[in-house]
Amino acid sequence: MTARRPCIAGNWKMNTDRDAAVALAESLATQDSPSCELVVAPPYPFLHPVGEALRGSASERAGQDVCYESAGAWTGAVSAAMLRSVGCSHVIVGHSERRLHFGETDETVNRRVRASLDEGLIAIICVGESLQERELDQTLDVVTRQLRSALSGIPHDGSERFLVAYEPVWAIGTGHVATPEQAQEVHAAIRAELASRDRSLSESTRILYGGSVKPGNAAALFAQPDVDGGLVGGASLDGESFLAIARAAE
């Protein structure tokens, strides 16, 4: 079994102004690095100043989304090369809010994953079901379909090129959270799907849980054998809470 280093990724979404973003980054940079990978995804305009604030720390940066085109007449879009040019190592792809509010589909998520990997970014691929889909007992079918589509045509070359984040849509920003057992069931299904592609890929890929992760529930979630960290929303906007979640993953 391959040892998987925990990862805690903070998705700041459309929050903070420049000063608040820098202050939040500074609160992370001054802490001793926990024994897990820390990634923060600030709004696009603050990627550079946040990078300056994190200089010398172990924390990494991610884009919150990426365009599948490399350049051209795509007003408002940001390419993978642009993210790399400001020092990003990761990018979130297929977040449910992008699917719901901006029309991203399984097909365009796949194109975004391809563009990210081609540029050397580590894609954090989001999958998850709605409340209605869970109530109809469709969770595993939905998650498996989304993951298969996201990875369609992408060969496994033996390196870690992506993470998977399971984010039940009904638990994002609602205060509701999947029980540790519910999270483990889906994470195990994701790992089984990866194993159907390549056993070593399944063992090495980190699968994060996202959906109202807080210091109070993090330890129980991370104790599950297939939960390798978290994609954290609201709690990542407070440095103390974010680091407490990271400590729970150690």
Image (cartoon, rainbow, N blue to C red):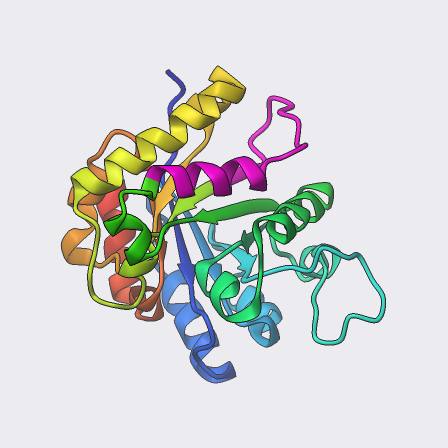
- Eyeballing the image, is 53 above or below 131? below
Q: What residue is shown at x 57% (from left), y 42% (from top)?
A: 150
Q: Is residue 181 rendered to the left or right of residue 1? A: left
Q: Is residue 155 magenta-colored?
A: yes
- Eyeballing the image, is 198 above or below 154? above
Q: What residue is shown at x 43% (from left), y 81% (from top)?
A: 20
- Eyeballing the image, is 174 above or below 15? above
| Residue 3 image point, x, y percent | 37, 24
* Quadrant, the N terminus: top left
Q: Nearer the viewer, residue 38 or 182?
A: 182
| Residue 250 image point, x, y percent | 27, 40
Q: Is residue 141 rendered to the left or right of residue 241? A: right
| Residue 204 image point, x, y percent | 45, 25
Q: Is residue 206 magenta-colored?
A: no
Q: Nearer the viewer, residue 179 or 62?
A: 179
| Residue 40 image point, x, y percent | 46, 59
- The magenta-colored residue range is 140-163
Q: What residue is shown at x 25% (from left), y 34% (from top)?
A: 185
Quarter occupied by residue 102:
bottom right
